[in-house]
Image (spheres, rainbow, N blue to C red):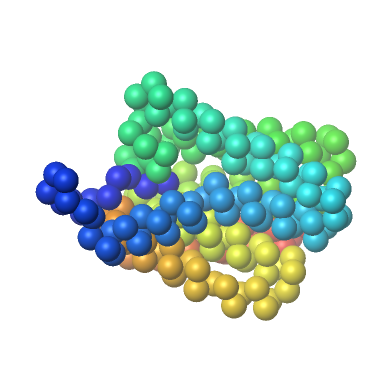
Amino acid sequence: MTSTPATSTEPGSAAPPESRAARLVTDHFEPKNWIIAVTLLVGWHTDGLAGVGWGLFGALFAAVIPVLFIKLGIRRGTWADRHLGKRQQRLVVMVFIICSVSTGTLLMSALDAPSAMIALIAAMVSTLVVLIAITFTWKISVHAAVSSGSIAILALDYGPWLLAVYPLVALVGWSRIALRDHTPAQVVAGAVLGGVVAGVTFGLLR
């Protein structure tokens, strides 16, 4: 979730190369993509194709429905873009996402989904709750939190070797700072909190 790039150029001129690279990283490694990837990967590791089905079900509430809500807001002019740079706009969307993910968690529990899948969605809810509490007073990086939490969950599920891809979190953090959407402190705090909250919740409940 970010705002439009803070770096500016004259009309008709190309954006600086660093800005273009940072924008590509921010857009391709946005929270939605991490959430879809981690739900499918945990689902596959949990129960093969059946687990992937549960992963798709979880992604519906954790990623697809929130994205549709954001797109509807953009179409109506409620917010400027899908990254939601303004803190007040983030709060509205984050509350909606918590409601959506919580609904998915309850349905998965009622439908007797594998415990690992319920733990995964619960980890998303707990992370969102912490992030929204902080967002009331400080613009913590959701990109960093989700990327860090996703890798922590995958490392618990597949093995610690997956921590080798943790530099991706640093890359995502760099993009947020380069675009001036977050300060280094906001990125570091997001990465630490996302990894700890998601990892501990998933580890305790799976």
Quick check: can you spot residue 186?
A: no
Q: x, y (%) of residue 9?
A: 16, 51
Residue that appears at 43% across and 68% down: 171
Quick check: can you spot residue 19?
A: yes
Q: Quadrant of residue 98?
A: top right
Q: Quadrant of residue 65?
A: top right
Query: Quick one: 17 or 26, which is closer to the camera?
Result: 17
Residue that appears at 21% across and 53% down: 14
Image quarter hosting the C terminus: bottom right
Residue that appears at 85% across and 36% down: 111
Query: Quick one: 185 or 13, which is closer to the camera?
Result: 13
Residue furthest out toward the left: 10
- Depicted 54 relative to depicted 204: above or below: above
Q: Is residue 139 left or right of residue 107?
A: left
Residue furthest out toward the front: 12
Q: Is residue 204 left or right of residue 194?
A: right
Q: x, y (%) of residue 50?
A: 86, 48
Q: x, y (%) of residue 64?
A: 60, 37
